[in-house]
Amino acid sequence: MKITGNVFVVTGAGNGMGREVTLQLLRKGARVAGVDLSEAGLAETKALAGQASGRLSTHVLSVADRAAVEALPDAVIAEHGRVDGVLNIAGIIQRFVHVDDLAVEEIEKIMAVNFWGKLYVTKAFLPKLKLRPEAALLNVSSMGGLVPVPGQGAYGASKAAVKLLTETLYAELRGTNVRVTVVFPGGVGTDITKNSGVDIPNMPTDSKAAKVTSVTDAGKQIVDAVEKGTFRVLIGNDVRSIDAISRLSPRRAIVLIADQMKKLLG
């Protein structure tokens, strides 16, 4: 679908990939409703938008707040007149600890933001998207939704749930005007650990040292997927390799990731 002139809702717009996607959509002439828990983060995104900031509305809320999300479509339509696409990017990670060392309350928070948040947003906006002649629904999963990552069990479970939810939506919406996309980022140079309130020891901070995809490139791949109506997007050589290995030998992929994570978990 075309970007110019259309209206997109982007969750997680106050930082990282959500911010980058918001800015790239604006550069292509879109109108954007940016959603984030951080008012300061959204204000920074608006400042970075420069002359395009007049096409960006900001909405401060938690995607895990069902009532707030259910009220969001009316607020967006009041501002922009319609909704043509929804990009569910907001997400958090957990502390790098084994499942048995993770409090149930922490697991519930991960699921609330990463899974339930995407489901709430999808349910709230899907009836509006169906009214458009052409529409897009994009959900961000993760490499952790393809293979288990020790120390990220709850996070991986939430992202695997997003994967299956989005694939189901793709199947259910075939033949309609709504194009569904699921995105699997590998390592991307964002501040997700800081924004999740998580400290990860032994983690490289330099993008080149960590061999991660730049947030600019990740954002471009997401926007391109919306334009082309791509069903499945793998961002980064790391996730493409793991995806291929997991298809050939699921056990080998699990062991490979587990061995790589030993340094972080000890």
Image (cartoon, rainbow, N blue to C red):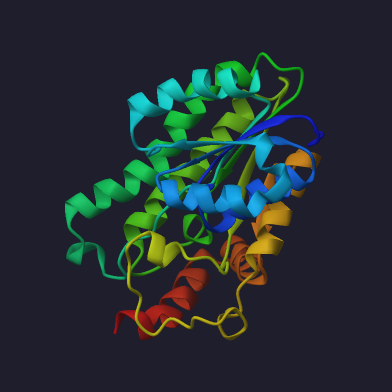
**On the image, which quarter does residue 177 sit in?**
top right
Task: Check the picture and name the quadrant holding the N terminus.
Answer: top right
* Rendered position, 154 above or below 121: below
Q: Is residue 129 left or right of residue 158?
A: right
Q: Residue at x 42, y 30 (%)?
A: 120
Viewer can see residue 148? no
* Rendered position, 107 above or below 187: above
Q: Is residue 73 left or right of residue 38?
A: right
Task: Check the picture and name the quadrant holding the C terminus.
Answer: bottom left
Q: Nearer the viewer, residue 162 or 90?
A: 90
Q: Is residue 96 left or right of residue 253?
A: left
Q: Nearer the viewer, residue 195 or 118?
A: 195
Q: Residue at x 45, y 62 (%)?
A: 192
**On the image, which quarter does residue 83 sit in?**
top right
Viewer can see residue 177? yes
Residue 256: % across, % down: 49, 77
Q: Residue at x 42, y 46 (%)?
A: 39
**On the image, which quarter does residue 240 sit in?**
bottom right
* Rendered position, 122 above or below 81: below
Residue 12: % across, % down: 50, 47
Q: Is residue 79 left or right of residue 25?
A: left
Q: Nearer the viewer, residue 246 or 239?
A: 239
Q: Nearer the viewer, residue 123 or 239?
A: 123
Residue 5: % across, % down: 79, 30
Number of labelled discs?
0
Residue 189: % across, % down: 57, 69
